[in-house]
Amino acid sequence: MSVKDEIIKEKLPRHVAIIMDGNGRWAKSKGSERLFGHKRGVNAVRQVTEAAVELGIEYLTLYAFSTENWNRPKLEIDGLMLLLMTSLESELKTFINNDVRLRVIGNDKLPKEVQKRLKSVEEKTAHCKRLTLVLALSYSSRWEITNCVREVAQKVSEGKLNVADINENIVSENMATAFMPDPELLIRTSGEQRISNFLLWQIAYTELYFTQTLWPDFGKEDFYKALVDYQGRERRFGKTSEQINN
């Protein structure tokens, strides 16, 4: 019996975020270069995206490349950018056939050709409604929050917003993620137990799930296990168990 059979459809999260970690270590364990692990990681992306579509999850956000990742060797970065472009081209038809919309969050430090390809896929899938697949590319939460502060400050300076009216909703509305709900579940692979500058504002009440599985080995069954674990938790949002049960 598949773990999928244990999932309660009525208790599925609307939004799942994933820190895809372990590609390099997976490749090293195979005696290969790090880029080989990234290439194998594309299959894990496909597996999880298919599972999310099948289950009816609305948003899936994948931490694909952080602002800190620009400090990696140039050869690896160039290989990643090329892999990103070729993967987008090969998966476009699958996105459309499965009603998957692609959106990207992050700064504009990506190479112009990569930005062009990403924008093209975003436009070609803009009509899709079944799942929104969000790629966090050249992204960091500190960048996002800093950018949000600038935008709010600009609105105040232009007289479009009063300082007294700034609240949590205003902050959320000026985040790169304003188009989607906060994630209910955050998964991190490879055994590391840290957030690594990812969606810090948005995960205030997100359930965290850490697994030893390296990203290239993460498949549908692993995704189902994370969802079953999530559904077994009590989400109180500051209330007591008695209040929730009543």
Image (spheres, grey):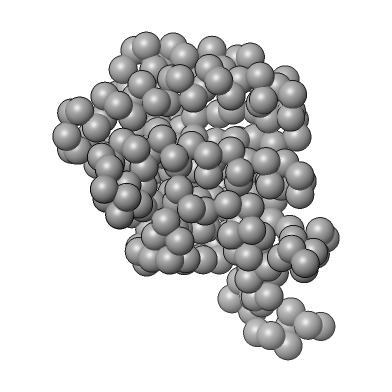
- Which residue is drawn at the image coordinates 81% and 83% (left, top)? 246
* Viewer-side residue, 230 vs 43: 43
Q: Residue 176 at x, y = what percent?
A: 48, 35
Q: To which quarter of the image does residue 153 belong?
A: top left
Q: How many marks?
A: 0
**As drawn, 59 above or below 83:** below
Q: Is residue 56 left or right of residue 46?
A: right
Q: Is residue 221 left or right of residue 109?
A: right
Q: Residue 225 at x, y = what percent?
A: 63, 65
* Viewer-side residue, 55 vs 104: 55
Residue 181 makes an appearance in the image = no
Q: Is residue 18 left or right of residue 237?
A: left
Image quarter in which the N terminus is found: bottom right
- Which residue is drawn at the image coordinates 34% and 38% (left, top)? 36
Q: To which quarter of the image does residue 129 belong?
A: top right
Q: Residue 206 at x, y = what percent?
A: 55, 62
Q: Residue furthest bottom?
A: 242
Residue 104 makes an appearance in the image = yes
**As drawn, 164 above or below 74:** below
- Which residue is drawn at the image coordinates 67% and 25% (left, top)? 94
- Which residue is drawn at the image coordinates 52% and 58% (left, top)? 186
Q: Residue 220 at x, y = what percent?
A: 63, 52
**As drawn, 87 above or below 187:** above
